Amino acid sequence: MRGLGRADDGTARRRRHCLSAADRAHRWGSIHLPDSIIGGVRGTSQSRETASSPTDFDCGLHFNYICYAVAVTTTLDALWLTTEQQTIWRTYLAGASRINERLDAELRPFGLDLGEYEILVNLSEADGLEMRMSELAQRVRQSRSRLTHTVARMEAKGLILRKSCPHDRRGVIAVLTASGFNLLKTAAPRHVASVRAALVDVVSCDDFEALGRAMKAVVEVAD
């Protein structure tokens, strides 16, 4: 068996291709496939030996990787989206991106982004205008480390302050300051207007209610 540092040129090329494909799958959650295959119209099972090119191999529904001179087989079997499902999915991604961009742009004159605005809203609705950081992270759907950086930035602007939890030395509580509350009251009308312009007033009442049901089903799915 060849050592890891003594592979021939063919093995080296296979390694590079293997790592490239694996890296793409790791980073993006999938390997790009032609629409005909993604839509489930057709697909072939190919191994590296029968594929006429790396592209042909990448387009197969089954992938056999040979990594570092050790045979490793990874099988990818997927129920591909139909053409209609794919169109809806991509439209959702484009729509969500456009809405977020618009809401961020509307909040920028107030020195806020959408994530910071959500933090202010959740603290304004909490008892005593304060909340444990761990609970706040769940409410605004941010990791604890990301929330810590965001709150530190907002604290530097005087919008939030942090204090220790009296019942848990390791716990930290975020508190909405008067400046933060006043900024929220100033920005809220503009934000609500942008939400209406970007989504609520654009779709019919029936479609908006259907969207609510769909998103409720999404958030109720267990991780």
Image: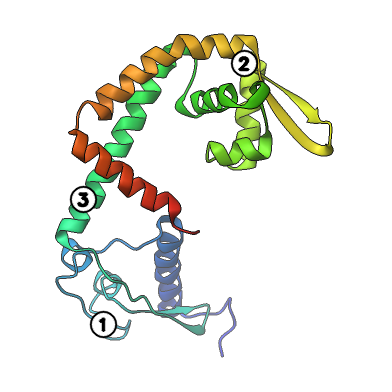
Along the line of sight, the residue nearer the viewer: 156 or 159: 159
Along the line of sight, the residue nearer the viewer: 105 or 191: 191
Can you say which quadrant of the picture contains the N terminus? Answer: bottom right
Separation (CA) of disc 2 from disc 1 = 57 Å
Pinpoint residue 148: horizontal percent, then vertical percent: 66, 33
Which three-letter amino acid code belongs to the residue tagged 3? Ile
The part of the image, by quadrant, that contains residue 178 is top right
Pinpoint residue 75: horizontal percent, then vertical percent: 39, 79
The answer to whether 96 is drawn above or below residue 154 in the figure is: below
The answer to whether 218 is drawn above or below residue 120 in the figure is: below
Of pointers 2 and 3, the one earlier in the residue sequence? 3
Query: Would you say the residues marked 2 and 1 are in contact, meaning their CB atoms lie under 8 Å apart?
Result: no
Q: Nearer the viewer, mark 3 or mark 1?
A: 3
Tell me the residue that label 1 is attached to: 45
Question: What mark, if any, has residue 88 been given in the picture?
Answer: 3
Q: Secondary structure at mark 2?
A: loop
Residue drawn 47% across the image and 9% down it: 186
Pinpoint residue 19: horizontal percent, then vertical percent: 45, 67
Question: What mark, if any, has residue 142 been given in the picture?
Answer: none
Tell me the residue that label 2 is attached to: 159
Of pointers 3 and 1, the one earlier in the residue sequence? 1
Which three-letter amino acid code belongs to the residue tagged 1? Ser
Which three-letter amino acid code belongs to the residue tagged 2? Leu
Q: Nearer the viewer, mark 2 or mark 1?
A: 2
